Each structure stands twice: as structure tokens, then as C-alpha cells.
């Protein structure tokens, strides 16, 4: 590869970059995503900090539940207000009107709980706790045991945990960072990979590809396209990621430390690798069709695979980041770019695994570049009907 | 000098080119004519490296074409195409740079050609917003903007209005006069006849006739037009050296088997015997007639699959 051969690649990359970044779609799209991310963060913050409150009324013998209810509520994270209801009928009406969450009447051990439709899960647990306490206390008192003394003894009990590796105080931050990284990578690869395919199809459908290919080799066009759009994607990744980090930093949920820097570096490195991989696949897929309407049909096998992998991996990552399934997934080349940076951020990926995943992905990407370049070179000048994979894989032109 | 030397190409079981051969000399305007599917577009695509030949070679100035020398060729593909959402000026500069021009050369050339082709007002407009005629002009500018040493144009006149045809003809002549080999294909045979220094007629992927229009006329057999008002019908039938006669062009057209002196004398004597002779001349067939004869002459022989491979 001589410098002279790389000049067209640079020209093509520059054109792709300029055409996209100057386009209104990019600016508006980035702003919209920024706003959506902001709204999403605000909603999450509201939900996380939102107080879980409930108001219940007690009447008759069930009034004995007042104390146990009030003591049980904090253990379920519920702020509970217990009021006495002298008039059960009025209280039922208040439940129907939504002013009360529940009316508790009858035997304190087996009370009748009247609710609008079904009780809030936390509230139900609080009531169950309270009734068990009442039943237990009655049983203990019947046998001459002071329930308060028992509680005091039980409160003293408990193990002393000694961990070989102390837990990371920033585990939450790391998880958030890892998930955000995985999401941004997924988003960028899907968006800009599809853009590569669209660009390929546009050149085919407008026939300009014949003029371009009379000046440059197919690999130069393909490489230039992937580099140009990859740079656009990277720019957006940096803008969105930077905005996210700035917001998180301002909100005080993120502390800058060595872990943060290494996470950012690994996200960028994996993005570059992942983009090269997927963009080539998308370009090859795009070169099989000649009309924009047909693009979706050749892209969906790829996008669906990525989407499924992403959904499965995302769940595994949140539930069990050290488990075997996510470890395997993050070692498989097509998914490594999505999940290895997240596992690095979580600090659960041994160096050996990272190196292995990197090597596997590099090898896989090289194979995809070779194969995709061949499909692309064979199909990009064929117009009309969709080119079959078999034809596309035939003898490549030099 | 652009030499197409024995190139063959097949698509599956279809033989598109069967040892296609012709040469375009410097300062020569070469017309490339043939029916649809005769192999004109395939030949041009191979010359530009857009397709690869199964056999044969394309040479420029004696050296096989490679990626670098191909950039010296200005190309107008049959399937017109430009980036629809790119502005005219930007697009021309980009295409010139892709063909190896520096940024400043590309800028100057884009300015010059848009000016020349009457597109100066449209430089900043997106190609998709232009009229079809103006898009064609941009397409021509795209072929010329890299200041090529050779021009290869596939159907450059199709879809042009008469004004644009004049501009196109002028530009082609100009490039020819500047010493460039220029080759274009066309179905507009009277245009080819008027413009071209030499013509190649292709059929079934092969050059079947090649030469100046006059040479092709010589080769196509000699016809005489004789106007003898008082002659009875069939007066020339059976004269020695006359292959066929027909009534046309206000008199009788004789197709001669040989154009020798005795034949001509014999015909003239026979004509005089019928009365006054108003006209006695060699007929100059139009290229269109030569083309029809050439293409009709040789029946389509089946091409053996082994030949092209």
C-alpha cells in the first residue's frame, strides 16, 4: 500500500465525513439523542429518588396492627402513614376515591384488607410482616416469653464478613459506565453501519459508482467509506459520551479516576475495531442490492443478530457480570466490541481475556474485510436484481 | 494511442466480447457503432478497468493499462450517474481529485468547465435539483474535468438537446485537435458520419468493419446511379458486371459486381442506346446504409464457448 494509493482513500473518507457532518440529519439527530438522553437521565433520577409512600387506615381490632405496621414499613423502604378509621364505611369510600391505599379491619392476625384493585407490592409485604409479628408476639407471650427481649437477642446475632478482595466502592459507577459504553457502541455501530450500507446503495442506484470505480479500486472506495463514516460515528460517540460524562460529573455520580480513563480508552479502541468489522459487513450487504427499498432486506439479518446479542448480553451484564455466559459472549468476535469494554469498566475482565478477545476480533475483522471486500468488488457494479451471495463470492476482480 | 487488442469477455454462458480489436490513434475521433448488446459498453467498461477481461489487453501508448494510466482517461458511462446530493462544483472538484489532480488544479478545472458548459450559475446547486439537460452537461464536465489525455464516451449524445449536441461535438473536436485519442459510441449514425475520422462497426462482440467512412464505402461495393428518362424498365438487367438493379433516386441504381473500366463503359454504352443520359454517377451510401449492410451481411454465427474463455 503506497501513499499514492492512500490519497484516494483519504479523499473518499473526507467526502463521506463532510457530506454527513454538514448534513442537517447529523446535527439534528445528535441533538435529539442528546435531549433524549437528558430526559431519560431525569426520569431515572426521579424514579430512583422517588419516595414510596402509602396511607392506610385501621379500624376495630386491627388497630393493634398500628405499631407493627409502622415498624415494618422502613424495612421495605416504604413511608407509611397509619390512621385510625372510626367509620369503616367512610374509610372504604376514601379507598375507592384513592385518598387511602388500604383499609385494614378485623382480626389483627387475619385482617381483611380492602384496596382499590390490588395492594402495592411493598405495602402488601409490610402488612404480611405486621400480621406475622402480631401472631408471633401473641404466641410467645402465651408461653411466657417477652418478645422485646427476643428481638434484642436476635438483633445481636449476625456474621462478620471477611472478604479476600474488598468490594469496589465504585462498583455502581463502573456498572453504569460499562452499560452506557455498551449502549453507545451498539447505537453507533447500528446507526453508522447502516449508513455505510445506504451510501453503498446510493452510489449503486445513482450509478455514480461506475465513474468512481473508473478512477479508484473497489477496496479504496470501501476503505474510504468505512473510515469516513467511522470518523463521523466516532465524533458523535465523543459528543454524546462527553455530554453524558459531563452531566454525570456535574451530578456528582461520577468521580474521575484511573478506572474512568481506562474505560474511555477501551470504549474508543473497541469502537474502532467493532466499526471496521460491522461497517464492512454492512457495506458488503448493501452492495448486493441496487435500490434503497431493498436495503432493509439484506441488512436485517445483520441488525437482528446484533440486536439479539445486545439484548441478551445487556441482561447478562446487569444480572451476572462475572458469569460464564457473558464471559463467553464477550469473547465471541462479533460481540466482543459491545461487551468487552463494559466488562473492562466493571473490572471483571482478566487481562488474558481482554487480550484474547482483542486478538480474536482482529482476526475475525481481517477475515470479514477480505470476504466483504470480495463481495463488494463483485457486486457493486451489478445493477438490477439482487446479487446472490454465491455469485458475489465468485472470482473477485483484481 | 489507445489499443483494444483481442479482448474477450463472457457473462455466464453469454459471450459478450469475442476478441474485440481496434485502435484509436492520437488526434483521431473514433466512432464506435453497433446494435444494442453488440459489446460496446462492455468494451468501454473493460478499457476503464470497471470490468475485467477474460482475455486480451488494452494498451495506452504501448503500455498495458493500469490504475495510474486509467486515471488519464476521461470516461462517460452509459448509465449516467453523479452524487445526487452533492453540489455541482464540489462534485467536479472531487472527481478531478480522485483522478489524481491537485486541489488547486481541480478547482480551476471545475471553474473552467462549468463556465464553458454554461453551468457557472449552477455551481453551488445540488445535482438532483438540475434539469436533465444540465445534469448531462455536468456529466460531460465530469468526464473532462481531470484534463484527460484520452476520452472514452459511451453514448455521449443520447438525451441531449440540439444545442447540447453542438457543444458536445465542438468539445470532442477540440480534444481531438489537441491530439487526444477520442472514442465514442452512438446510434446516431449521421452524427458519427459527420464527426468521426474513423468508424468501427461491431457485431456480436467483434469488430466486423473498420476504417474511414470513405474506406467503408469502397469496401461496401460500388453502386451507380443512372438517370435515363426514356429507357424501358429492366434496361440494365443482365449487363456484364451488374449484380442487381433497382429503381430509386429518380433513376436506376445498379449494384456492380466489379467496378472495372469495361463494366462502367458497358453500362454507359447501354444507357446511351436507350436515349439521353441525364445523370451517370457513383452513389455515396450513407454510413447508416453501410452499417445495415455490414450487420445484415454476415449472419450471426454461433460463437463456440471455448473461444472466448
Image (spheres, coloured by chain):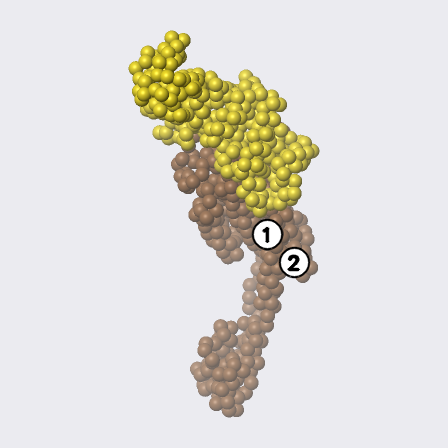
Which label was assigned to residue A153?
none
The residue beneath circle 1 is A25
Label 2 chain ID: A
Q: What residue do we see at 35% from left, 24% from top? A: B247
In what element is the residue under mark 2? helix
- Residue occupying image coordinates x 45% and y 85%: A107
The answer to whether residue A224 shows anywhere in this view is no
Q: Position of residue A152 (x, y in %)?
A: 57, 75
Q: Position of residue B293 (x, y in %)?
A: 38, 23
Q: Residue at (47%, 31%) from the top-left corner?
A: B188
Binning the other alpha carbons within 10 Å of mark 1 as few (below 14), some (14 to 19) or many (20 upward) gives few
Residue A301 left/right relative to B97: left
Q: Toward the viewer: A76 or B299?
A: B299
Q: Which residue is mark 2?
A: A248
Q: Which residue corresponds to the image point at 67% horizontal and 56% vertical from the top-left?
A: A246
Report the chain holding disc 1.
A
In the image, residue B2 above or below residue A102: above
Residue B276 is situated, as x and y percent measured from the top left of the image, at 40, 17
Q: Report helix, strand or loop for mark 1.
A: helix
B261 is higher (above) or lower (below) than A98:
above
In three-dimensional space, the C-alpha distance between marks 1 and 2, rounded to whole angstroms, equals: 27 Å
User: Residue B304 versus residue B33: which sits nearer the camera?
Assistant: B33
For residue B268, what is the image quadrant?
top left
Considering every residue shown, the one lying at the far top of the view is B262
The answer to whether A19 appears left or right of A277 in the picture is right
| In the rendered image, the vertical position of residue A317 relative to residue B271, given as above or below | below
How crowded pointer 2 is (Cα within 10 Å; few <14, some 14-19, many 20+) is rated as some
Residue at the limit of the structure toward the bottom, as seen here:
A87
Which chain is represented by brown in the image?
Answer: A
Q: Position of residue B120 (x, y in %)?
A: 65, 40
- Which quadrant is the N terminus of chain A positioned in? top right
Shown colour of chain B: yellow
Amino acid at each position: 500500500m503506497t501513499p499514492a494509493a492512500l490519497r484516494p482513500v483519504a479523499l473518499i473518507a473526507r467526502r463521506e465525513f463532510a457530506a454527513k457532518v454538514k448534513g442537517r440529519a447529523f446535527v439534528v439527530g445528535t441533538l435529539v439523542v442528546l435531549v433524549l438522553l437528558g430526559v431519560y437521565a431525569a426520569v431515572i433520577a426521579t424514579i430512583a429518588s422517588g419516595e414510596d409512600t402509602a396511607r392506610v387506615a385501621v379500624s376495630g381490632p386491627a388497630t393493634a396492627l398500628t405499631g407493627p405496621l409502622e415498624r415494618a414499613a422502613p424495612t421495605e423502604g416504604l413511608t407509611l402513614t397509619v390512621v385510625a378509621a372510626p367509620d369503616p364505611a367512610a374509610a372504604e369510600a376514601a379507598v375507592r376515591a384513592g385518598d387511602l391505599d388500604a383499609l385494614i379491619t378485623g382480626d389483627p392476625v387475619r385482617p381483611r384488607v380492602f384496596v382499590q384493585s390490588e395492594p402495592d407490592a411493598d405495602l402488601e409485604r409490610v402488612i404480611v410482616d405486621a400480621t406475622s409479628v402480631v401472631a408471633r408476639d401473641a404466641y410467645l407471650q402465651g408461653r411466657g416469653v417477652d418478645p422485646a427481649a427476643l428481638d434484642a437477642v436476635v438483633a445481636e446475632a449476625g456474621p462478620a464478613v471477611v472478604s479476600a478482595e474488598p468490594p469496589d466502592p465504585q462498583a455502581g459507577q463502573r456498572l453504569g459506565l460499562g452499560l452506557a459504553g455498551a449502549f453507545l457502541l451498539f447505537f453507533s455501530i447500528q446507526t453508522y453501519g447502516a449508513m455505510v450500507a445506504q451510501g453503498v446503495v446510493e452510489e449503486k442506484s445513482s450509478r455514480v459508482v461506475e465513474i468512481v470505480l473508473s478512477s479508484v479500486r473497489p477496496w479504496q472506495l470501501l476503505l474510504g467509506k468505512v473510515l469516513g463514516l467511522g470518523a463521523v460515528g466516532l465524533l458523535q460517540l465523543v459528543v454524546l459520551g462527553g455530554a453524558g460524562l459531563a452531566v454525570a460529573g456535574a451530578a456528582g455520580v461520577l468521580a474521575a479516576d484511573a478506572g474512568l480513563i481506562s474505560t474511555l480508552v477501551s470504549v474508543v479502541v473497541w469502537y474502532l475495531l467493532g466499526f471496521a468489522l460491522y461497517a464492512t459487513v454492512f457495506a458488503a450487504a448493501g452492495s448486493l442490492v441496487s435500490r434503497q427499498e431493498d436495503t432493509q432486506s439484506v441488512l436485517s439479518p445483520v441488525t437482528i443478530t446484533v440486536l439479539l446479542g445486545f439484548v441478551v448480553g445487556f441482561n447478562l451484564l446487569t444480572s451476572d457480570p462475572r458469569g460464564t455466559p457473558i464471559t463467553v459472549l464477550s469473547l465471541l468476535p462479533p460481540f466482543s466490541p459491545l461487551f468487552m469494554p463494559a466488562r473492562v469498566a466493571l473490572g471483571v475482565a482478566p487481562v488474558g481475556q481482554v487480550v484474547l478477545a482483542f486478538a480474536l476480533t482482529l482476526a475475525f475483522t481481517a477475515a470479514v474485510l477480505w470476504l466483504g471486500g470480495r463481495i463488494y468488488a463483485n457486486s457493486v457494479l451489478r445493477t438490477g436484481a439482487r446479487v446472490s451471495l454465491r455469485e458475489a463470492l465468485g472470482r473477485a476482480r483484481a | 494511442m489507445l489499443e483494444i487488442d483481442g479482448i474477450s469477455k463472457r457473462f455466464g454462458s453469454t459471450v459478450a466480447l469475442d476478441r474485440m480489436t481496434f485502435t484509436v490513434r492520437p488526434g483521431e475521433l473514433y466512432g464506435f457503432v453497433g446494435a444494442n448488446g453488440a459489446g460496446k459498453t462492455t468494451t468501454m467498461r473493460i478499457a476503464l478497468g470497471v470490468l475485467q477481461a477474460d482475455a486480451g489487453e488494452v494498451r495506452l501508448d504501448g503500455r498495458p493499462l493500469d490504475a495510474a494510466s486509467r486515471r488519464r482517461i476521461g470516461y462517460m458511462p452509459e448509465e449516467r450517474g453523479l452524487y445526487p446530493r452533492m453540489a455541482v462544483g464540489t462534485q467536479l472538484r472531487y472527481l478531478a481529485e480522485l483522478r489524481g489532480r491537485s486541489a488547486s488544479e481541480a478547482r480551476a478545472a471545475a471553474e473552467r468547465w462549468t463556465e464553458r458548459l454554461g453551468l457557472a450559475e449552477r455551481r453551488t446547486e445540488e445535482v438532483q435539483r438540475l434539469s436533465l439537460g444540465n445534469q448531462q452537461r455536468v456529466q460531460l464536465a465530469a468526464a473532462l474535468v481531470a484534463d484527460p489525455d484520452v476520452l472514452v464516451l459511451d453514448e455521449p449524445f443520447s438525451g441531449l438537446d440540439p444545442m447540447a449536441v453542438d457543444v458536445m461535438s465542438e468539445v470532442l473536436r477540440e480534444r481531438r485537435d489537441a491530439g487526444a485519442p477520442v472514442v465514442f459510441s452512438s446510434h446516431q449514425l449521421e452524427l458519427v458520419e459527420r464527426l468521426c475520422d474513423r468508424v468501427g462497426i461491431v457485431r456480436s462482440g467483434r469488430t466486423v468493419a473498420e476504417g474511414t467512412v470513405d474506406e467503408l464505402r469502397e469496401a461496401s461495393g460500388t453502386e451507380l446511379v443512372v438517370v435515363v428518362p426514356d429507357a424501358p424498365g429492366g434496361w440494365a438487367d443482365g449487363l456484364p458486371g451488374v449484380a442487381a438493379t433497382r429503381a430509386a433516386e429518380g433513376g436506376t441504381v445498379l449494384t456492380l459486381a466489379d467496378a472495372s473500366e469495361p463494366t462502367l463503359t458497358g453500362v454507359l454504352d447501354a444507357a446511351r442506346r436507350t436515349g439521353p443520359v441525364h445523370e451517370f454517377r457513383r452513389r455515396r451510401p450513407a454510413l447508416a446504409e453501410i452499417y445495415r449492410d455490414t450487420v445484415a451481411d454476415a449472419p450471426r454465427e454461433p460463437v463456440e464457448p471455448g473461444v472466448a474463455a
